Amino acid sequence: MTPLAGYLLLSAMLFAIGLAGALTRRNAIIVLIGIELMLNAANLNFIAFWRFGPNPEALTGMMFVIFAIAVAAAEAAVGLALIIAIYRHYKTTAVDEVNHLKG
Amino acid sequence: MADLDQIFVTLKHWLLGQFANVLPECWLPIISILLSLAPILIVFPSFFAIMTVMERKGLGRIQNRYGPNRVGPFGLLQPAADGIKALIKEDVVPRAADKLVHFLAPLVLVVTAFTVYAVLPIGRNMVVLDLDAGLLFFFAVGAASELAVFMAGWSSRNKYALLGAMRAVAQMVSYEIPLILATISVVMITGTLSLPQIVLAQGTYAGLLPDWFVFTPWGFAGFILFMIAANAEANRSPFDLPEGESEIIAGYFIEYSGFKFALFFLAEYVSLFAISGLGITLFLGGWNAPFPALAFIPSWAWFFIKLIALMCLFIWTRGTLPRLRQDQLMNFAWKFMIPMVLINLIATALWRFIDAGLTRWFVCGAIVVIAYLLLGRGLMQGKKIAKRTYRFAD
Amino acid sequence: MLNQMTLSFAIIAILIIAGATAAMTFRNLVHCALAVAVAFAGLAFAYLQLNAQFVGLAQILVYVGAVAILIVFAVLLTRGGEAAEKKVFSASWIWGGAIAVAVFGVLAWAIQHSFASQREPLPEAGASVKQIGTALMTKYVLPLEVIGLLLTAALIGAVIIAMREEDKSK
Amino acid sequence: MESWIVKNLWLIPALPLLAAGLSALLPRPFRKASATLAIGSMSGAFLLSVVAFVHALKNSGPDSAKEFFNFAWLQFASGDVGVLKLGWVLDPLTAVMLVMVTFVGTLIFIYSVGYMAHDENFTRFFTFLSLFAAAMLGIVIANNLLLLFMSWELVGLASYLLIGFWYHKPSAAAAAKKAFITTRIGDVFFLLGIVWLYHETGTLLFYDNGNGCLEQTALSKMVTHATVGGLAVSAAIGILIFIGAIGKSGQFPLHVWLPDAMEGPTPVSALIHAATMVAAGVFLVARTYPLFEVTLPGLAGDSAATVSTALQVVTWIGAITAFFAATIAVAQNDIKRILAYSTCSQLGYMMIGLGTGGVAVGMFHLITHAFFKALLFMGAGSVIHGCHDEQDIRKMGGIRNYMPATFLTYAVGMMALSGFPLFFSGFWSKDAILHAAHSWSVSHIPFYLGVAGAFLTAFYMTRQMALVFWGKYRGHERPAVATKTPQLLALKEEIEPHESPRVMTVPLILLAICTVGLSLIGTPAWPWFQDFLGSHHSEGFTKDTVQIIMISGLVFLLGVGLGVGFYGYVKRKTASEPDPLERLPLGMHTWFAKKYGIDELYELTVIRFNAWAARACAFLDEWVWGGVVAIVSYVTLAFAWLNRAIDEFVINLGFDRGCERVSRGGSLLSRLQEGRVQVYLRVLGGALVVLVLFLIWGGGK
């Protein structure tokens, strides 16, 4: 098994775990964590492809990861803020109880 | 005097050679890293021990009382006594506490505190691993310590501890921004993140003064801002709200006792040394001698001289300034430090692009000073600052 | 040297997977947050091992230093810190698990049978900070600006969303 | 030939305009800033005008070419005729007016700093003042009747704002409205005149190298045409324009707004009535003088030219106003109203001067009058200020002991106004007018009216002086404060008049000096001013000059003597005593006091008619148009009903069916999305799986 395949499998595993968490957990924060994990899996993919890709000199994969990290940070901030707002409003963070659009 | 300057480096290589004879090839990298880590793990804790005495005696003098003066000559053996006491003391863990996290927290804290030294150039050719992104490494690892603090506070299941942890984390997060931005200006000038190269960039001498960045307008402002932020990062007075004894007994490590407690203290001081070392590296010319004439004193000695000087500065500050209030703390961070640092960045950029001469001195100096005056005025609007009065025991 | 590589890779993989699994299964939210921090750290090590030094350190700085802290704060602000909830998994968790497993299955199958993953690794390929910086400042300057804008917007937005709205009683 | 100052004459009005704009943006607390701005800009304008004046002096003379600078303003039609050109002119007339307006204006600005010190709308006041000054200067420099008209209207607006400055006083608001509307009446005719002029000459530029509307070709073209009653077109246009002037400078039929305008703050009165606004009318006539004086034989070169109809009108109106306003002034008790009526009559004199003696005579009186009337108004303001906003002269008296500076300056102004022989500018200017009127070829009645007016002027000014400054203070009817208890002293402080602050008295003194000084430049012995304005044939002290001087001196003495006789010796004890004049036969005094009931007359005629017309319009509106509208609306309603019916029974049914189906389908679909995030996520995951499988087996290769 080549290292690239190893990293890809690892990222796939990570993605699957994140997805499972996002699909099964009730707490919105954990769902968010799961999504973050999936994002990181994608990042790992990018880095792996950059490292083992045909021309690492073009820093495409790395750049993509850098921007992805920035975006992920923003996403986490806004997402958590939303969760807090929701909690204030519904007094719960269970995603399956927050199921109607208008307060 | 090169040999004295390089004595530790040569020593390490010699030892490495000895090991090469007895051990297989693939072990050597690990051995070399261990050989570089060992001194750090020995020197800085002992430095911490000395520093505690120094601090307690200094504070004592400032507060007009004797410091520790019983154990050994002038109480110099006080830290040894404290260490022994901490070691043989019972380690109490609250029943409600989250055992695992409660146990891990001090370890993580200490580990991060020590890991930081990996990129710190203590002397010429004396850096454990010369990372290309050393500065980033420093801050990345430093950031990890916040989590440890939170772990400590949360796992103790104690409202004071949680409060202190929250305060500490909030404070660290808010002061990390000015800290990093202040260092960015140096990076802008030197164009590298690797600390040894930054030190080399300050190695030359211009007439009377050395080319240390602290001797430029932006560098001076940056250094002061950096030191303030560092003070806050290390949770030291006047920013010691997280462990303000009078409010929340000892903050996040209230529930720790015995050796773990000592570990917290160790970590705190070690990270304080580390961040002071970073300040020295970035602004005070690292291990460079202030004057060519004094270059015969070995570089590592210079580093420690500067470190002790900064320590005295910290002790002095702690002994002088009263503790801030939480809102004052946050206001100071977000309304003064961050704007100031951003303006300092602008000044640095101008410095970078105006060619050498008096003009750039005037321009950058003017920007910094004006910004300082305006911000200060703006924040001091309508505040009554009473003159401090002193009462001496007699 | 390769065995060393694989060894470290194994360690890192185990760290990541363990952290992620723990984060997804623990009952106590704070434990989940800490576990996910571990997973993030593991990912950072993975990046370092892939010679992506800058990204790795940035990963630690952003995820362990910021996102994990954010999560922890959110947990405490939503009173998730004290007791583990009675019902952790949603009603139809079977479905979710099944789908997740299926996804992993197909992905793994695809990876195993794709030609890309058969490529042998190149000799050392790395990127110095200088290269990254120049790339960011020249070729990728526009995305950089956009990201800056986005982060500012996110900052303000997060503050406004999380701001306590005035109680309607008055 | 176009020198810098001519090209940049616009700077002079631009400065105050800028000040107005800026201080309009200033928030209220910035009092000092706005005052500084206004005064600074005004004095800057003054310096520029001095430059302009010197320039005009350099190339002045009997045959001095007018200097002007024109530029194309907007292109409203193709071709050269379609270009509307604006411009400004610099000739002795402009120069003199500029210097006068800016100088007096500056003094008034400074004065009003003191006068308005306690008003909270300080900045607003200075904004308006600057706007007013800018507009006035615009009138002065305009080389285009249209530009002049614009500035003219701006002046109207500014005066409206200023008179109504204390709009919370209903009387002030009413006065402002009155002033605005009355002047509008005149302006309508003015506008008609402009339009007609444009129709006739195709240009509104005054001077444009021979094709301006005031230059030979255009004039001859106009004077040769004749309209109804053999009236030359030029004369007709002149009269129309003159009506505008009547409105602005309060001549006989349209003078009613001027006394009421005293409701405004006193500096405003000074600015409007003394220096600028009312002078604008006179200036307008002077500016368009060629239009007035041109006659057919005059064009033919006949030196003993007959007087044109327009000039006759001007003269008669002036004469009537001069006399009759003076009579009214005799019986007024409000210190400012007296001055207002005297302003009316003085303006009448100016008109006489213009009509009979030409530009120079009228303008000379304008200038002198501007100075001493501003002086008087500001003195009155100072008195009012000192007497705690008391305006009734019967309630004053003995002020001279309290405010000496004001008293002296006021005395100088009074002397000048009532024509104290030989030493005061007013005397010489009025004398010149009387002389011109005396040697008028048409009739001598204006002369006699003028003399009578002069007598009355002397009389009522003496009366005012006596009542205000002599005798003892009647402000408080309570017994004088004798005991020395502190609170009583404080009371004394509060009820006794006090001298005004330096910032108010210094301008007074300056103006007084000018008032005396100006008398040197216009005497028959050395008529420098008239020569400068360049339309004068001076013959020094001839026999009839001396005779006129004697007459007016005599008249002055008579008036003053009578005044002293009536008011000087019999000191009135209390404010409520009847006025000695009330013993005059056939209730003349009441007539005077009622201002000949002209306001009432208008009330009965114009305003009632107006109201009636309004009611008629309302009636029409209600019944005729209203009816039409109602019918239309009913028709519309009918249509609407029809539509509704169709909707109800045809379209809706169909729609309902459709909608039911759609909603049923919708409810079916909505089962899928009951708002649970994870369900959506699950679908996404499944979709991913399917997609990858498809890629592997289907699209993979």
Image: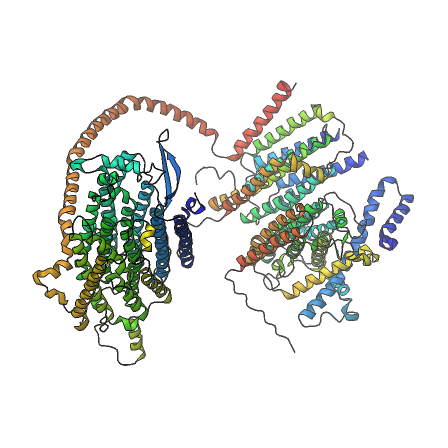
In the image, residue B17 sits, relative to residue B82, either above or below, namely above
**In x, y percent, where is residue A90?**
47, 44
Res. B231 image quadrant: bottom right
**Residue D170 seen anywhere in this rendered image of the structure:** no
Q: Please give left or right for residue D543 compared with residue B374 in the image.
A: left
Q: Work out which quarter of the rendered image holds the N terminus of chain D and state it.
A: top left
Of residues B243 and A93, the one drawn nearer to the viewer in this rendering: B243
Question: Which image quadrant: the C terminus of chain D?
Answer: top right
Q: Observer-nearest residue: D279 or A63? A: D279
**Is B89 above or below relative to D619?**
below
Q: Residue at x 85, y 39 (%)?
A: B26
State the residue in front, D606 or C98. Answer: D606
**Number of numbered discs visible in the structure rendering:** 0
* Displayed quadrant of residue B391: bottom right
| Residue B100 image offset from top left, x and y in percent | 67, 50
Q: Compare residues A74 and D497 and report the one nearer the observer.
A: D497
Q: Residue C20: x and y, percent?
A: 65, 39
Q: Position of residue B152 (x, y in %)?
A: 65, 53
In this view, the residue farthest toward the right is B21
Q: Is residue D554 visible?
A: yes
